[in-house]
Amino acid sequence: MELKQLKCFVAVAEALHFGRAAERLHMAQPALSAQIKALEEEIGARLLFRTTRKVSLTSTGALFLEEARATLERAEAALRRARSCERDDIAWLRIGGVDTATAGLLPKVIRDFRKKLPSVDLRVGEMLTAPALEALLNHHLDIAFVRVAPVDPLLTSRHVFSEPLVAILPADHRLAKKREVTREELAREPLILPPRSARPIHHDMLRDWFREAGLSPSIAQEANERHMILAVVAAGLGISILPQWVAQFQHPDVVFRPIRETPPEVHVHLVRRKSYRSKIADEFEAIIDKHLQRLQSRRRD
C-alpha cells in the first residue's frame, strides 16, 4: 500500500467524482481509476460503488476513509518534523516521566517555557521509568524524567533533584497529633502502597528501608493511583508512605507528616538521547536549572 493510493482514494471519497478528483490531483482519470483498483485488490474489499452517474462509499470505504486521512496526516507531520530537524528548527518537544517530576517540578517549568516559546508544540505524559526509557530510545519522547539513571550508551542523563518520602495518615489517627513520626511507628500500621508490579522501585525502596531496622510491616491493601491511596487512607484503612509532592493534593481527612529517621528519597534524573540535538530542549533544561537554583536559594534562606 502506497501513500499515493491513499491520496487518490481520499480525493475520490471526498469529491465522489472521479473526474473532479483527477483534476484535483493533476492526473489522468484512467490512472486514478487504476490506483483505486489496485488499492481495493490489496485490501480485498470494495471501497467505492461506481456507476455511470454516481460514486458512493461502501461501508468498508467509509471506515477506511478515516484511517486513510489519519495516515496521510501522520505522514505529513513526519515530513514537517524531518524538514524542521534538518533546518535545526524543531518546533515540538515531547516529555514524559515519573509523577514526582510531572506533578512536582514540571508545571512551573512548563508555564515559564510556554511564556518564552509559545509556538512550540509541547506534549507531556506521565509514565514509569522503564516505559519512559523505552519511549526515549524509540524516539517517541525527547526528554524523559526517571527514577534511576540509565546505563545505556545511547542515552545521557543528569540528576535533577531528590525529595523525601513522607507519612500519610488519617486526620484522626493517633500519630497525626505528632509533628513527625518514626520508622518503628509506621511499621506497626497497616500500609497502603502501590503494587510492586506497577511501581517496583518505590516498593523495593520501602521494603529495604524497613529491613535495615529489622522491621517487616504488613501491606493491608494495594492501590496504584495516588488519589485512590489518599481515599483509602482517609477512610481509616491504613497509612501510606509516598513522595513529598503528594502533599499538594490536600484532603480534609488526611495529614502529611515528616519521618524522623532519614527517610528514603526518590530521585529524578533527566535523560536524553546522545544523538538528540535541539535548541528547544536545551532551553527547556535551562528553565529547569533556573527553578532549581531558586529552590536551593530559598532553602538556604
Image (tube, helix red, strand yellow):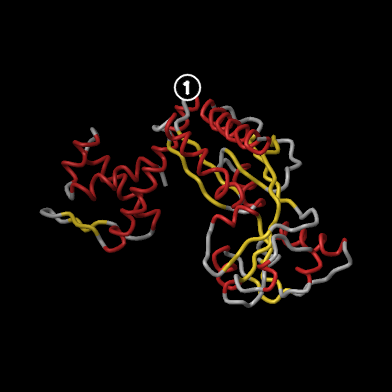
Q: Position of residue 77 (x, y in %)?
A: 41, 38
209 in relation to 27, above or below: below
x, y percent for residue 36: 30, 48
Residue type at tag 1: Arg
Q: Quadrant of residue 149?
A: top right
Can you identify the residue that label 1 sits on?
87
Residue farthest to the top? 87
Residue 293 drawn above or below residue 261: above
- Quarter of the picture containing the C terminus is top right
Quarter of the image where one finds residue 144: top right
Q: Compare residues 135 and 234 and report the one nearer the observer.
A: 234
Question: What residue do we see at 16% from left, 42% from top?
Answer: 19
Residue positioned most to the left = 53
Could you say which is closer to the camera, residue 279 or residue 256?
256
- On screen, residue 202 versus residue 83, left or right, reads right
Q: At 50% across and 45% down in the image, what residue appears?
A: 124
What is the x, y in percent for residue 73?
Answer: 37, 43
Q: Secondary structure at mark 1?
A: loop
Q: Nearer the viewer, residue 286 or 180?
A: 180
Task: Give the residue displayed 86% in from the left and 64% down from the top.
Answer: 211
| Camera-side residue of 159 and 61 | 159
30 with respect to 74 (left or right)? left
